Structures are given as structure tokens and as C-alpha cells.
Image (tube, coloured by chain):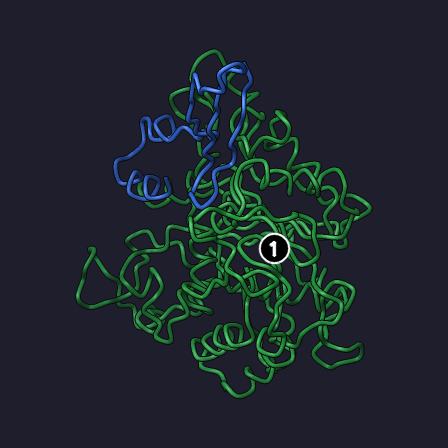
Amino acid sequence: MRITRRQFIKFISATAAAMGLNQLELEKVAEVLAKPSALGTLPVLWIQNQVCGGCITAFAGVFAGEVDYTDINGDNIYDTTGLVQAKALNSPGYTAGSNASSSTVDDVLLDVIDLKFMNVIMGPAGELAASILDYYENTAAGGSFVVIIDGTIPSEDKYCGLGYVAGQEIASPSNVEAIAKKAALVIAYGTCASFGGVPAAMNRKYDAVSGRYEGGMTTTAAFAGPVPDDWAANSYNLLQKVVRIPTCPGHPEALLLTVVDALEALGSAYGGRLPSGHPWKPTVAELVANIDSLGRPKKSLVLSKALGVNVWLYGQPIHLACPRLPKYNLGVFDRYFGDTRQGCLQQLGCQGPSVYTPCVSLKWNREVSSNTTCVAQGAPCVGCGAPGFPDRTLNLQYK
Amino acid sequence: MATYHLDPVNRIEGHLGVELTVDDGTSAVTDVRVKSMMYRGFENILYKRHQKEAITIVQRI
């Protein structure tokens, strides 16, 4: 998957419009960040564990209908019979779903990110695909790539298989852990990867967490949960932290803006485009300080520096930016679902004051209006981006 | 008898795999298993919950 300059400018301009900011300023940011990098890009592996597919749908929706399937020669990777042409996996420029190198360099800016592996959009299947994971686990140099982990991490390999290479199964968590421990950055995308989410919810039938087979299992040994912090505690990881992008699904703009921050802070060797000393350039210390105790980025550093305002990601509760906050201040509260007064939803169980997500500050689906959030539509916030979702937040709502 | 795996199957959401058993002599496929490689257990998660919680949980299948 390759993201063109036009797509990136479109995306970042929509972000500006959604926030009511000066669009010209933001396009300037996009122009700088979208410059082609002579150094190429950092490969990104998107690994799915116990997922529902919502995160990928949300992320792929950013560039929906604009995925490019041409290879290095400009040919479509699908031949006339619809079969995938076998590609040398580790040849220069190979990426999942397309080729990173382009015959039209002018019009393509590559790579804010360069996806090597992603189940849903990649071209190869079977061993051809699984051997990408095998390559990054066993052959690739440590610290030469980024891993985005999607979905809850199961307790044992038998709950989540990722593929077969030479008759050997690649499975989560053991192989995923080995890959993550070689990565320069480990990003947990979505509530499941960040905090456990629905697959790690309380299983009242067996008085244990879920994510396991029914018969013959001990109740507590089988545990499904978030990406463990120690996956990032190694010599290759540049932050020594798992960066978490919660909400269900993960917020795609928050992911992209966080990746941009990280690449710019880590420098040109990692695909950063701002020259050293540039006023927008975040330092690694700022990057680490921007990540809170739960691993969430508080704000977008590059955008905040470029625009002079705080572009909040996970540093502000959605209540403070809620479109219904004026009604709260006036003491107008909805008493039932669909109340035409469109007041504050607090009495219907809204979790807004305690949930730190970019839902309201960045909106969803790149819409300019504020209607693309749950609270604007009259649905109280269920806290899908909070630790403890769904058990803690739903218990508060429906007790 | 040789066993071949087509796993993962791309362009599908979830973890799908196909296991083929091929007869060495005739090259005929003698057995095919289509496998879902991932388990979460939504039935157990929903057990004894308030019905309104199902609205929020089941939409995440």
C-alpha cells in the first residue's frame, strides 16, 4: 500500500477543517512531511491477533478506493487470470498490495508509511505471505522496521495462527513476540491491543477471562490481554515503550500523526523528512514525554508545533471538547434516548469526562461537521478507548 | 501423502487457512480442511450479562 502526496495532503487538510484550523498552514505541513525521502522508508508490519477487522477497516478507509496495485514496472500485480504473480518477497521495493518503488516518482510521495504485511490488502497469500513474517523474525536486522499490533494477544499459540512456512505454523503470541522484540517501534493499535478489549472481557461462564477454548482448560492460565510492555524493553526499541492507540476501532488519524511524530523525532534514518534544527521537529525526549503512563500519545507534536495550538490526541477528555458541552453548562440533560432537547448525555451513562480519546477533537471519517461522533448523535460514550472496556465502562452504564 | 498449507488466505478479514492432503502417487487431493485459525469466545463473554451490554459487545464480532 502506498500513500500518494495528494492523498496525504487531502487527509491532513480534512483534519485541519475538522479542527477549524487554517487549512493553508496545514497544507504547508503536509507538503513538508510528504516530501520524498532519498533514504527510503521504514518497513511496517501490520500483525493481526485476535481481531474483528474494525481497526483495519477504519485505517484502510482513510485511503479508501485509492490503493495502488501496480508494481515496479507499472504493471498491475494481478494478471489477466486474476492470480497473484509471484514476487521475490525481499526484492527492493516490494510492499504488500503494491510496490514501494514507483515509475512515476514525481507524482508519488512515498511513504509516510510503507506496509510490508497486512492480511486484508496484501497481494500474496499462503507461504508467500507468511514468509514475510518469517523473514522479519529470523533474517531482518533488528531495529530496521516498525510493528503495528492489532488485536488482543492470546495466551497460547493455539488460539491464533498466522500462517505456515515450510510446514511450521507461525502463531501469536510466540512468533509475534519474537518479531516485536526486534522492532524499532511497537505500536498497539485499537483497544484490544492496547488494553485487552472485548476478547479479554470477563467470562462469567467460567469465571475467567475469555479468549480460550471451552473444555479442559484451567480457568486462569488461559489469558488474553494487551500487548505486554516487556515486548518493547530491548536494545532495538527506540522508546522502550509500547505506544498505544486505543479506541474501538483505533483512530486512524491518531495512528498516522503518531507515526509521523515518531519518524520525525527519530530522524532521517527512520524516514523523517524535517532537517535537524527545524522548528517543527520534535526531539526524542519530547516524544517520550508526550507518551503518558498508559502509553498513549497526548498530542500530535509536529502539528502542535507547526500550528502553535495543541492538537490533542489522547491528552484531553472528550467531555471538554464535546459538542453538547454548552448544554451541560446550562444544566440541560437528556432523560431518555432520542430526547429532542439534545442535552448532555450524562444521565444516560455517558463516560465522556473520564475517557481520553481524539473522537471529538479529530472527529471520525474525516468529516468537517461534528456529527461524526457518538455523543453528537445522542449515543452516550461507552468508553471504548478507556482501560477496562468493556467490563468496567459498561458496568458503570448499565448498573 | 503430503500435506500442504495455504495459510493465510489474503484479502479476507480474519485468519483463514486451507490444509490440503495430496496423494503422492496420483497427485490427487484426498482431503481438504478449511480452518478458521483464531478463537475469541463471544458466547462465553456474553454469558450472564445485561442484555444492553450485548449491543456494545456483539457489534465487535
Q: Residue furthest right?
A: A235
Which chain, by letter, is blue?
B
**If the image is split into quadrants, where does the C terminus of chain A sit?**
top left
Viewer-proximal residue among B43 and A393? B43
- Residue A322's x, y, as percent? 39, 68
Viewer-proximal residue among A306 and A56? A56
Q: Residue furthest top?
A: A216
Residue type, numbered disc 1: Thr
Count of numbered badges drawn on the protein: 1
Viewer-proximal residue among A292 and A333? A292
Chain A: its colour in the image is green
Direction from residue A2 to residue B55 in the image, left or right: left
Against A40, residue A124 (above or below) is: above
Residue sitting at 32 percent across and 39 percent down? Answer: B58
- Residue A316's x, y, as percent? 52, 64
**If the image is split into quadrants, where does the N terminus of chain A sit?**
bottom right
**Mark 1: which secondary structure?**
strand
**Around disc 1, counting alpha carbons within 10 Å, would you say few (fewer than 14), some (14 to 19), or many (20 or more)?**
many
Against A361, residue A119 (above or below) is: above
Q: Residue furthest front?
A: B26
Against A188, residue A163 (above or below) is: above
Name the residue that disc number 1 marks.
Answer: A95
Chain identity of mark 1: A
- Residue A193's x, y, as percent? 55, 44
Against B3, residue A395 (above or below) is: below
Residue sitting at 58 percent across and 26 percent down? Answer: A157
- Residue A383's x, y, as percent? 42, 51
Say which quarter of the image contains residue A161. top right
Residue sitting at 39 percent across and 65 percent down? Answer: A365
